[in-house]
Amino acid sequence: MLYVGWRMLVGNHSKFLGIVVGLTFAGLIMTQQPGVFVGLMTRTFGFITDVALPDIWVMDPEVQFIDDNKPLPSPTLYEVASIEGVSWAKPLFKGFVTARLPGGGFQNCNLIGVDSTTFIGAPAVLLQGHINDLHQSDSIIVNQEGALDKLATPPRHPGDPKTPLQIGQRLELNDHRAIVVGIAKTSRTFQSQPIIFTTFERAIQFSPPQRQTLTFILVKAKEGENLQTLCDRIHRQTGLSAYTKEQFKDLTIKYYLKYTGIPINFGISVLLGFLVGAAIAGQTFYNFTLENMRYFGVLKAMGISNKVLLFMIVSQALFVAFLGYGLGLGVTCLCALLTQDSMLAFRFPYSLMLFSLGGIFVISAFSAILSLRQVFKLDPAIVFRN
Amino acid sequence: MKKISLLHFLIGASLFGIGGGLFMGYLSSKEPKVQVPLIAPTTSPFEFFIAGSGIVESSQQNTTLGTSIAGIVTKVHVRPGDLIKKGEALLTIDDRIEKAALKTQEANLKAALTAVREAQSTLKSAQDQYSLIAKIVDKRAISKSDFLKIQNDVAMARTAVDHAKSLSDVAKAQVQASKVNIALCTVTSPLDGHVLQVNTRPGQYASTDSSGSPLMLLGPRAHYDIRIDIDETDAWRFQKGAEATAFVRGNPNLSTKLTYAYTEPYVIPKQNLNGDATEIVDTRVLQVVYSFDPEKFPVYVGQQLDVYIKALPVAPDVRYGGPLEKSR
């Protein structure tokens, strides 16, 4: 019986392709669009992901997301470091600075100041240079994207490629001399400004004068300490907000979800993809069943039970769902491969894979149910009427 | 046959696509590389503690050297890091004026001594006159007024001698004062210790005004003190004499136990080391001083250390609401 269903499905070449293409598009839209959405959302907390060593981030209670800089008074660092269960606490400066490029242009940059002894908060992967070079005077480390593009020297003749920022090159940060000693690989951030890493003290010199400079306190819990308990303790003893890495990521994402139109726009496009895919696939599958109604009639007349027919149609639907899903996913992979390491954000966690799989199956099930209704209602006598 | 191959292709492509999807999922689930800190951060040896940064200073604080005579420095006898004994010459200030003054005073003294001798010889001549007439038996040989005059001459000459003598004492004292001034031109060490900083060079003007940078910074070397700032919100947790450990920044293996020295009872505004003039101070800190033996711990005066002081745990019901959950 399965073979009969199979032949029925594959028998009409163009119809079969039509169903598969419809489901492929549905699968593509349901994987690619959410992938870009997840990628974009991941970028919002790219910096938190990069600073992977500390467990807890302590900040002003008013901070809403990672780029919200509300510095604390400097003695707070030792207040937090003195709390029971804290293994160590290190300062992190995060701010903005205007870099003057060798060519005379200006570029607004993210400025990160890390603890000058341990360099906690500095990038984990350096493509060029060594982290130790940050001990040199006026030294900075620039992220790769910034060095290749926004901080690169513009070409002498229009149309030529830019010259990337090199180690040893000089920048002017807020009228201070700064020397590039390293190029770092960092996660892309949402605002995709160049990131400049330097020591905490130097970052304060570079940035415009401000009363308070301690943007974040990075805390490592003692071994065996419950992070949530420690966060609560820090909050109660200092009145500051303390978040675990994951909580801070959630906070940042929630901010973007709430205050930017990104999720709604992407949600709509995913929903549209789903609907279009469902319409195409459902309609084609339904048509396909209608056109094969004759054969179903014959089968019914031959005394095949509804149960077996259900099995046939469901297996047909499952098969096309599998093909559509696989092909859609394949096209998504190709897209991702082609746009790898580019401006396009794309991330594809396993959960997303399950999500789109579920979507495809909902579409197939929907079209199968439509078809089944017709088949169940079918009177076997139809075969003899024409 | 053709249909089957298309089907095969489609099935193969979908399997390939699912494989690609799984691979992408794997790529996305990979955690980013965790940074290895260049130097491991120091951690507290105590369960309940106050963390702070301390600045190393000489015991009894550092001595900022001053001078009681203002003038041009002619010679600096020591270099930073030199060990010095109490009374050892540190720098010399141009003493030509003082030396010239001494010469004048010496000449004055000489003149004063001459004046004494002159007065004495006058006295002698008056006394001789008097002894001559005193030997005369017949008093009528000399008029009463002449006798009285000679007698008074002696008394006057004696007073003149006294006067000249006291003038010479004044001149002597002035000579002495000039000598002291000359001696003051050489500034000597008030303590046994070492030179931390030399801020003056020959040819510079050394002022008696102490508001600028000191001529030299001196410190005793028997033991070093470490001054720790404790935030006022944590000040109540500090107990006098509490155990403390200091760690050298840049090498967490280098640490030393500290001995409690004293607490400055006056809470002062926190000084920031970045030296930004626009900075407004808004917190005050309690300064606690501990000491340690510099021979066993390779640090320099002025260096910052990470310090952990054993302290009272924060009791429940303090700060921001109810009892805290117990850790572990």
Image (cartoon, rainbow, N blue to C red):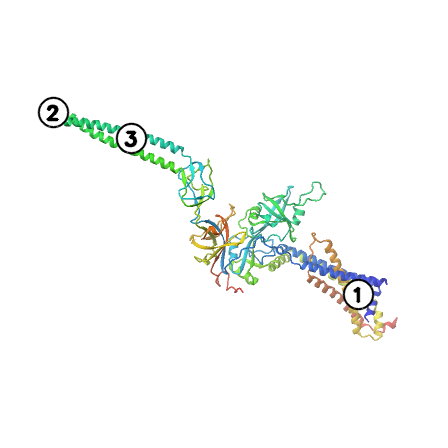
Q: Are marks 3 and 1 in contact (CB under 8 Å)?
A: no
Q: Write down the residue under mark 1.
A: A285
Q: Earlier in the sequence, mark 2 or mark 3?
A: 3
| Residue A99 as seen in the image, left or right of residue B247 | right
Mark 2 residue crowding within 10 angstroms, few (<14) / some (14–19) / many (20+) = few
Tell me how many marks there are. Answer: 3
| Numbered label attached to residue B140 | 2
User: Which of the two residues, A364 or B253, is positioned nearer the viewer here?
Assistant: B253
| Quadrant location, the N terminus of chain A | bottom right
The chain holding disc 2 is: B
Q: Quadrant of residue A217?
A: bottom right
Pointer 3: what residue?
B113
Which percent across, then down, holds residue B185?
40, 37
Q: Marks 2 and 1, how far apart in space?
A: 174 Å
Q: Nearer the viewer, residue B32 or A378?
A: B32
From the image, state whether disc 2 or disc 3 is nearer to you: 3
Which chain letter goes with mark 1? A
Category of crowding for the residue at label 3, using alpha-carbon neighbours closer than 10 angstroms: few (below 14), some (14–19), many (at least 20): many
Is disc 2 placed on a helix, strand or loop?
helix
From the viewer's side, name the closer residue of B220 and A383: B220
Name which residue type carries label 1. Phe
